[in-house]
Image: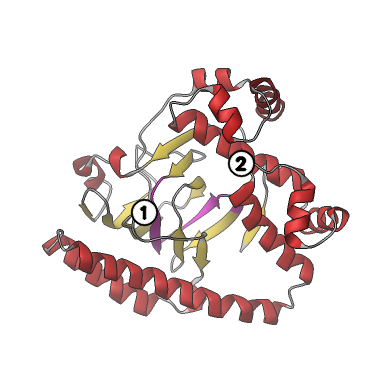
Amino acid sequence: MNKYNPHIGMTKKLTTFSLQDIQPETMRQSLDSFQMASDYAVAKGLRFVGNPYITSGMLLLLKEARVGIVSAGEAIVEINLTEYHVQKGMILLLPHDTIVNIRSASDDYALNGTILLPTIHVDEPLILRPEDDVHQDTMLIYETLCTLSLNHPDRKDVIEHLQRAIVDNVCAIHYVIIPQQSSRAGNSRGEEIFHRFKMLVSRNARTERKVDFYANRLCVSSHYLMSVIQRISGQSVMAWVEHAAMLQAKILLTTHNASLSSIAEDMNFPTVTAFCRWFKRIEGKTPGEFSKKYERKLPFIQM
């Protein structure tokens, strides 16, 4: 279902997208229906191909958590550190500050979905396949959410309950299905370590960039971890860590009015010089050069 390539999108510019970036009337031109409040949104039939605000390969930071239900077509999408072949019938649960790179999409690719209220917390990206048989119950809840948001958009307590029901349903199915799939596939201890490693990297790469940190957290030796990650993903531990850390650096550089010294401190570098050298080694340009050439656009992305 997915491939592992920590270098996808490494040199691309990062564009932030949040509720504050949405122009409702313009957004509705690319959707079958769209309802929006100050802290949530509900959409149907959001199309990718032909949408002037989204381009293939655009690297996007989604500020709010959201649920996406693929209603038609297919696409190749990188979500944080993993590339997925997303198809009709799949459900995507994405936490806040998820980084998405839409690499390609079919002409009919479209999504339904909702941007979640800030009171609803999502821990990690979850992807459910069509054969996971989740559509019926989830879609019933989603259709009720659509109706309520259209007729009574101010009933935030009920809207929150419906959004939570969707999230809880997806999580419940995921945590039942994944162990069964792992058992049927005979997943090895190394694959389990790789999955846990990716989660650790996603959460800690901003400040932790040494192999020993991840090996200790996973209770394995550094040599074993490096061997497992290289064998399963075809990439080194440090390739994964530096890719995730670079994405975090780009977030800070493009979405915060912070000085280089504060960014260096936030990312646990001893000096600004050390941060700049690290950034240029990976990105091929200094943080200042990256920021200067960065042109912020406001794309309209699928929910």
In the rendered structure, which disc, 2 or 1, sits on the residue that comes first in sequence?
Answer: 2
Amino acid type assigned to the residue bearing label 1 in the image: Met
Q: How far is mark 2 from mark 1, CA to CA?
A: 26 Å
Residue 187 position within the rendered picture, expressed as x and y whole percent measured from the top left: 73, 73
How many circles with numbers are drawn on the protein?
2
Residue 169 in percent (x, y) is at 41, 75
Q: Is residue 234 above or below residue 250?
A: below
Side (left or right) of 85 relative to 117: right
- Mark on residue 225? none
Residue 208: image quadrant is top right
Write the start and end of the magenta stretch as one range: 63-82
| Foreground residue among 216 and 62 | 216
Q: Nearer the viewer, mark 2 or mark 1?
A: 2
Viewer-nearest residue: 65 or 230: 65
> Residue 12, can we see it?
no
Query: Mark 1 — residue?
Result: 303
The crowd level at tag 2 (other Cα within 10 Å; few <14, some 14-19, many 20+) is: many
Element under disc 2: loop
Q: Inspect the image, locate mark 2, and give the three-letter code of the amino acid beneath it.
A: Arg
Q: Nearer the viewer, residue 49 or 80?
A: 80
Residue 45: % across, % down: 30, 57
Looking at the image, do the residues carrying marks 2 and 1 touch, with CB atoms under 8 Å apart? no
Task: Give the residue at x 41% y 28%.
Answer: 296
Q: Residue 206 carries which label?
A: 2
Residue 232 shows in this picture: yes
Q: Looking at the picture, tell me which residue is in the foreground, 272 or 117.
A: 272
Q: Is mark 1 on a helix, strand or loop?
A: loop
Identify the image quadrant of the N terminus.
bottom right
Residue 67 painted magenta: yes
Using the rendered view, name the quadrant where residue 284 is placed.
Answer: top right
